[in-house]
Image (cartoon, coloured by chain):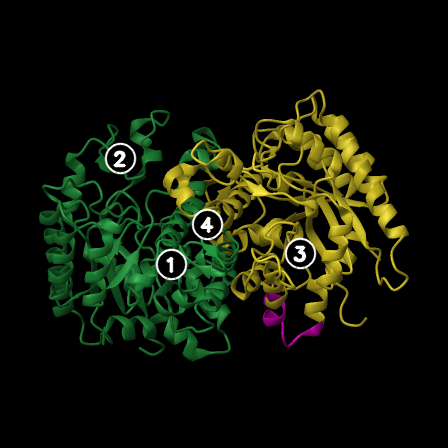
Chain colours: A green, B yellow
Amino acid sequence: MSGPLVVDIHTHVYPPAYIDMLRARKKVPYIHNPSDGGPPRLIILASDDDSNIPVDQRGRPVDSSYSDIKVKLDFMNKHGIDCSVISLANPWLDFIGEEQASEWAQKINDDLESTCAQSNSTAAPSARLRRLFAFGTLPLGAPSPAAIADELHRIKTLPHLRGVIMGTTGRSQGLDDPNLDPVWKALEDTQLMLFLHPHYGLPDEAFGGPEIVRRYGHVLPLALGFPLETTIAVTRMYLSGVFDRFPRLQILLAHSGGTLPFLAGRIESCIAHERTFKVNGGNVQGPQRDIWDVLKTNIYLDAVVYGTAGMKAAVEASGGTTDRVLFGTDHPFFPPLNEEDEKWASVVTNYSAIDKSFEQNADAIARVLGGNAIRLLKLA
Amino acid sequence: MSGPLVVDIHTHVYPPAYIDMLRARKKVPYIHNPSDGGPPRLIILASDDDSNIPVDQRGRPVDSSYSDIKVKLDFMNKHGIDCSVISLANPWLDFIGEEQASEWAQKINDDLESTCAQSNSTAAPSARLRRLFAFGTLPLGAPSPAAIADELHRIKTLPHLRGVIMGTTGRSQGLDDPNLDPVWKALEDTQLMLFLHPHYGLPDEAFGGPEIVRRYGHVLPLALGFPLETTIAVTRMYLSGVFDRFPRLQILLAHSGGTLPFLAGRIESCIAHERTFKVNGGNVQGPQRDIWDVLKTNIYLDAVVYGTAGMKAAVEASGGTTDRVLFGTDHPFFPPLNEEDEKWASVVTNYSAIDKSFEQNADAIARVLGGNAIRLLKLA
């Protein structure tokens, strides 16, 4: 094989134990077996658990691509991916109560570790990189933030885990919650990458109400709700001074930051004109570092943005460098509607956006496709 | 004078008659005179009309910059702006009931026309362009859409009006409301530019609730709520097929499209993977034209994006051309907090983003600063 090494840092799994748990549940998130014998359906979005939709049609069909690591490896082979950094898919353990949070996090993280180890030990000799690494998951619902920090320190000892994935709600109060400070501290101390990912979208009212949302299928919640959720979450983090108190945080934002690269300038301008923050020209209550500095120091962006316009903004917001943007696929989500398709359109679109954005610069393409991930997550 | 002609296409006014109406009102939008004799305050955002905020501190101070055209001309002189295309500021006539909608629209539009005519007739002989043109306003609350179309045709006859400004709610049902078809038809027939502008932001719940929103002053509603509102509105228009039915619409999106340039790829991908829309590979219910085609054919973007990251996405989403991006200031909003500032930071930031984005290309800078507006709105 030739060409640049390709690492997919945005690729999800539901380990079998997690799938079994979803099968046993009757409310979101859950797996439902349709009465017509069709494939089981995964209902993870609140908007999908809608009494206006027949129960057998809610959510999306779930197949072995969600949990069978062999299917992941086949997908990687088909799309020229050397290495995947797998992560638990949303909604992670957000819904697990405090009694079970730590136990579930340990179970998932140990499962990810053994899946990676086993798969790598049986990889073909021709493999140019170990095939699998993982982002762990956190017991955010644990009784105390110390338990979350403890699991971070334990994750640091698992050889194939190179970071953690997290949603936007934190301990249910958002990412500007001061109760998360021990978590930020542990992330700084371990220097584990935090992969920040959306799940909840926006309330239906933001789109004009549930009837409007239903009219367009999943387009409004997924195309707009997800990235806007990420943008709001990281902006609240920033506004509350998290990056001032924890300047060594390393955060990978899903979907190229939601819309943060595009809106960073407007955020900065609104802060500069905000009377709540400014007294005598100083920034007395707002963030002390400017957002461009945070983007260049603390934030990495995946390249799951489906076009050159977003890609160029992502690179520019990163300080004009291609060192901070990382290829991803979002597998197993967005599969082809026509199952006979050879390659997934969603993946081809993201490959193509990288090629077109940097066509004059093979080094830049190599960095975005894999070099950055290898360097940052120490994969080689 | 030398250098490129500069046209500001995003600059607002409240004509004196509109100010008087706001003074007479007691609910949003309204103007309140503080009991301490301080400057009157303008309360236009629902989130500002908040019983947790002392009544004398709600909203923002309103001064003559909102209504006195001499102040606008001084601002233009200070910032090197040759020509401004003024528009009624939000929330326009959205709150005017059906009995008065047409009457108010005519009054505002006639006032804009006479303000421009009078100002241009007294401009200095050294002026390189007529100083003022305007975007008119629409009687969206009129009893029938035909009345809105009628006002569009009347606006077409007013020599200084070159388009119309509109919010995102349309006739209260959003811009995918089929009742707006006569308005789209009249816009196509007159080929007036529609300047689409946010006002309502997102519900507080999208940000985590009113307490979170208050914590950061106006940053969340203005920095994120406004652009996300625009993005949602134009996406609903697009998803409902407005651009299929009215392929000659010409729409200028405020704040560089909210976040549309960044998210266009994701929107396109989500549509391609939406079972509601796709049957046997065809797009049976969704939009028939791809969003990149709409961006290159129907949409223009202002350059009010406060940084090179947004600017580069705007140009790339426009098809890689600088022909569709237009300089603006958002005056009189975002004034300096320190009144002694010589030039407005918000304006300097946008000038600088244009310079930095196109530093190798003086023609591109000239197009964005004024050439595009002059060509599209026939200002010279």
Is B239 placed above or below A212 here? below
Q: Chain of mark 3?
A: B
Determine if marks 2 and 1 fall on one subunit.
yes
Who's the residue at 56% across and 29% down the image? B173
Q: Report, in whole angstroms, how far the alpha carbon at label 2 lies from the one at label 1.
A: 25 Å
Q: What whole-number distance in Å separates the C-alpha atoms at marks 4 and 3?
A: 26 Å
Label for residue A190?
A: none
Query: Which is more foreground, mark 1 or mark 3?
Result: 3
Which amino acid, mark 4? Thr
Question: Dot 2 corresponds to which residue?
Answer: A38
What secondary structure is found at the residue carrying circle 3? Answer: loop
Q: Earlier in the sequence, mark 2 or mark 1?
A: 2
Residue B36 at x, y percent in the picture: 56, 37
> Label 3, on which residue?
B328
Judged from the image, the secondary structure of the residue bearing numbered disc 2 is loop
Nearer to the camera, A272 or B358: A272
Residue A284 is left or right of residue B113, and the answer is left
Q: Which residue is mark 1?
A: A343
Q: Indicate the quadrant containing the N terminus of chain B: top left, top right, bottom left or bottom right.
A: bottom right
Specify which label sits upstream in the sequence, 4 or 1: 4
In the image, which residues are magenta? B353-362
CA gap between label 2 and label 3 equals 55 Å
Q: Is residue B95 above or below residue A301?
A: above
Q: Residue at x 50, y 61 (%)?
A: A281
Left or right: residue A141 versus residue B364 is: left
